[in-house]
Amino acid sequence: MTVTVVTPTKGRPGPLRRALRSVAAQEGLTAAHVVVGDDCPHLADADHRRALQKEFPHARFVNVVPGEHPDMPRGYLPARLSYLRNLGAGLTRTPYVAHLDDDNAYAPAHLRSLVDLLESNPGAEVAHSWRRLLTEDGTDFVPDGEDPWHPIALQRSASYRSLARHGIFVPGSSVVRDTMRMTDEGMLNRVDTNELLLRRETQLRIPFPTDFTLWQRILGTTEDMALCERLLRAGVVAVCSERPTVDYYMGGFSNAAALV
């Protein structure tokens, strides 16, 4: 069994190597890796790219130059990331596609556990895990009392309480128990990109959206939230391992320095 992991990157070779090592260390299957550079200076350097290819022969490195991609979104970073993720997914040939940011890492059993879920649930098209939040020095980050991703600081406490009622946040825990489901209150599209494994045909049929409304931009809607909304509206069945097999390092978008 082979899974292809897609990683967009801009210019952080240290964290990228950590991500590459975690994909190479996956157990119980073969993990290929497509790394899509967003006009990345490191991937544009032939010597650096050759060194990466030698160190990580399971990976393919593609550098996207905006001038050669006139349809690449500009002005809203999640739309740009969607474009890069879709481009990487289109280069895959394996039955399953996963995603990993350049600053995060998988536990060794991450992909195998999700593949097993999909193979034992043939009606499901998406599997996902939970994630453990870490600081840059590798210690646990516990988001007690505030949702660190809410775009409005004054609403972070209320958002935390709401998500805690759904079991996503647990006081005192660094594990985020993400979910994607319909509730009595509406749509709960809270699965991070790094946790996702999709059947390839699902990923190609329902790609990451590259068009975001003004309201979505005001709300700070990310590409993973928008994808989960699309999947839910399409009636896609998702299953969860309920295991924190993603190490999620706090610090923002992987290519936030991109000129958008």
Image: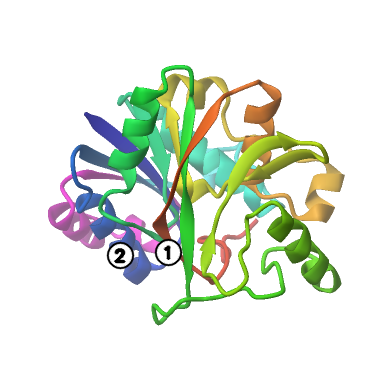
Residue 120 location, x and y as percent?
35, 24
Residue count near mark 1 (Cα–Cα under 10 Å), binned few <14, some 14–19, many ≥20: many
Quadrant hosting residue 32? top left
The residue that appears at 58% across and 25% down in the rendered structure is: 206
Q: How is the image coloured?
A: rainbow
Magenta range? 37-61
Residue 71 location, x and y as percent?
62, 35
The secondary structure type at the circle numbered 1 is loop
Residue 124 higher or lower than 128, as above or below: above
Q: Where is mark 1, residue-wise?
A: 103
On screen, residue 224 versus residue 55, left or right, reads: right
| Amino acid at dot 1 | Asp
| Amino acid at dot 2 | Arg
- Whether residue 68 is visible, yes or no, is no
Q: Where is mark 2, residue-wise?
A: 18
The residue that appears at 81% across and 37% down in the rendered structure is: 184
- Quarter of the C terminus within the rendering: bottom right
Labelled disc at residue 228: none
The residue that appears at 23% across and 48% down in the rendered structure is: 26
Residue 6 higher or lower than 148, as above or below: above
| Separation of marks 2 and 1 at Cα, in angstroms | 7 Å
Magenta-drawn stretch contains 16: no
On screen, residue 144 versus residue 66, left or right, reads: right
- The answer to whether marks 2 and 1 mark residues whose Cβ atoms lie closer than 8 Å is yes
Magenta-drawn stretch contains 42: yes
The secondary structure type at the circle numbered 2 is helix
